[in-house]
Image (cartoon, rainbow, N blue to C red):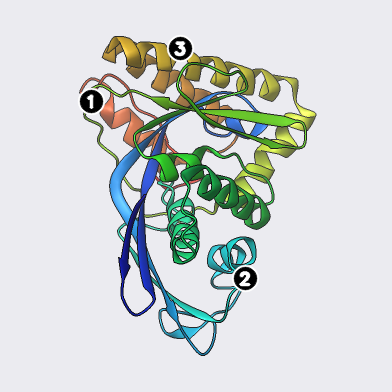
Amino acid sequence: MRTKVWRGSMVTCSAPGKMILLGEHAVVFGKPALALAISLRITSSVSNSNEYSVNGHPMKKRHHAYISASLDEAWNGPPINIDTYSEIPSGSGLGSSAAVTVSCIAAMLATKGKLEPEAVARKAFEVESVVQGRASPTDTSTSTHGHGVMVSPDEMDGILWRIAKGDRVWNVHHCDVPPLAFVVGHTGIHAATGPLVAKVKKLVDSDEDAKKAVDRIGEIALEGADALRRGDKRRIGSLMTEDHRLLNQLGVGHPLLDKFVEVCRGISYGAKLTGAGGGGS
């Protein structure tokens, strides 16, 4: 999360996208997940205006769901215009919704001189919960903090903050990441997060094997964090491949993603979908 303030009441903040290395979907149920910030970012600028607008056009909740919800969560001032610039493909599984939410909220809070990362992360999580119906703080906390983030129900070394929603509790930790190279392939297929999260919840509520898959995905995230600390690329790769199989079992795969994974066999340590699935990356 980066902030710049100009005279004339304009504030600009940028936030990175993310790649979930291990643990997506299971983390929504309070299980561990491991995520990394990526170099692609979304930049949001807040300036005075005669009406609420986005990129100079009237704001419409239907088209600007995350920005509109961010206003409800973080703004109590006069009308503003929000300009956004994105390097992250929408619906790609790379955290575009989290990055736009974090950058917008950070810019709004910065105008009041109240820019604290934990406050940004909490408010951004509430926004994603409202828009998606059910969410975890993984994407928004990673976009706020940058670097590597480990989310788990238990507190560990390096804790940044704790977020609770109902009976679910997530402890968000900084995770040191050694130099690693990841290649991200984008299918070009847009996949909205909310419906996929709802699909998995419905399956888990009715299928014991799906519950076991969620539990195992959480275990994989913990094992992956340990392998990451040790720099064990082979172990990380094998866990990624297992994770992909389990995510397919939860019904969030896509034939093109499976082709990507198959192509990577023999030329990489491992491969998997990242994010909500159903397309994306």
**Residue 22 showing in the rendered view:** no
x%, y% of residue 192?
A: 54, 54
x%, y% of residue 128?
A: 59, 52
Q: Quadrant of residue 146?
A: top left
Observer-side mark, 2 or 3, equals 2
Name the side, left or right, on which 105 lies relative to 43: right
* Of callouts 2 and 3, the N-terminal one: 2
* Residue 240 circle label: none
Q: Is residue 266 above or below residue 170?
A: above
Residue carrying label 2? 76
Residue carrying label 1? 180
x%, y% of residue 100?
A: 44, 59
* Of callouts 1 and 3, the N-terminal one: 1
Residue carrying label 3? 223
The residue sitting at 27% across, 13% down in the picture is: 231
Q: Is residue 19 above or below residue 245?
A: below
User: Mark 2: which secondary structure?
Assistant: loop
Separation (CA) of disc 2 from disc 3: 44 Å
* Of callouts 2 and 1, the N-terminal one: 2
